[in-house]
Image: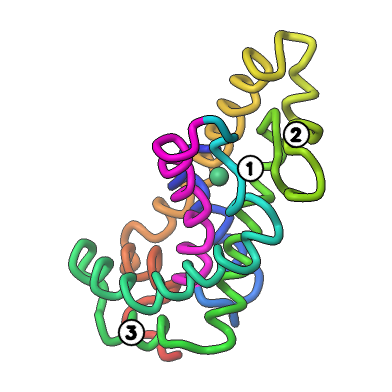
Amino acid sequence: MPITPLHYPLAFALSKANKKLILPGLVVGAVIPDIEVPIMWVFFSDLPDHLFLHSLVGAATVGTALAVFSTWLLYSPLISTIFRVDKGNLKQACSLSGMLVLSCLIGVLSHLLLDFPMHWFNPILWPWVNPYDIVGPLVLFFAPYGPINGTAYWMANRLTNAAMIVAWIPILLYYRDKDLWSNHWLGKSHTEKF
Ligand SMILES: [Zn+2]
């Protein structure tokens, strides 16, 4: 995975590409598949640490459902407490709706899209295709420099993380004097109407 929060810039870009999408749903969807990683480490250490939630079938079902419930129930209290974003606006954005479900689904799929090129195994078509049969294109690109589960993966991983950090900086700079946290977590200034 890119470091999990580094999925944020893609979620933000998607919210700008289609303004009907709900940024909180995109953001939560974009990070939620990685909650399986520590669970796999602890309870299923003989299996790949990316599996069910990183498969299309798992992402579109359980992953999206988890994202919807987390956005609906947890996003407003957490973000309003930590970042002082207006709670009323957050609650309105995070209320249950078809658009919230769609935003979560797209967020989860954006996670898989970003993970795919930089992993040396991909459970994207699990359970039908063995994850170890699908090597990410960026890992293949770096394969001349070392093993796909070693140096090539390391290089693909670092490049992806660096690209996402570079993508995030302009977002923070652009909004630094413009209601930063509201734009960052809600997708709007607190005065903008829905
Ligand atoms: Zn991931």
Query: Picture coordinates of residue 70 (x, y %)?
Result: 39, 70
Residue 130 is one of the magenta-drawn residues = no
Residue at left offset 81%, top offset 32%: 133
Q: Earlier in the sequence, mark 2 or mark 3?
A: 3
Left or right of 93 on screen, residue 156: right
Q: Quadrant of residue 130?
A: top right
Of labels 2 and 3, the one closer to you: 2
Q: Which residue is mark 3?
A: 91
Residue at left offset 23%, top offset 63%: 83
Q: Which residue is mark 2?
A: 136
Q: Which residue is mark 1?
A: 115
Q: Quadrant of residue 187?
A: bottom left
Tell me the amino acid under the disc marked 2. Answer: Gly
Residue at left offset 59%, top offset 35%: 48
Spatial CA span between label 1 and label 2 = 8 Å
Tell me the amino acid under the disc marked 3. Answer: Lys
What range is drawn magenta here? 23-45
Q: Earlier in the sequence, mark 1 or mark 2?
A: 1
Left or right of 54 on screen, residue 68: left
Q: Are marks 1 and 2 in contact (CB under 8 Å)?
A: yes
Q: Is mark 1 within 8 Å of ligand 1?
A: yes
Tell me the amino acid under the disc marked 1. Answer: Asp
**Which element carries disc 2, helix, strand or loop?**
loop
Residue 25 is one of the magenta-drawn residues = yes
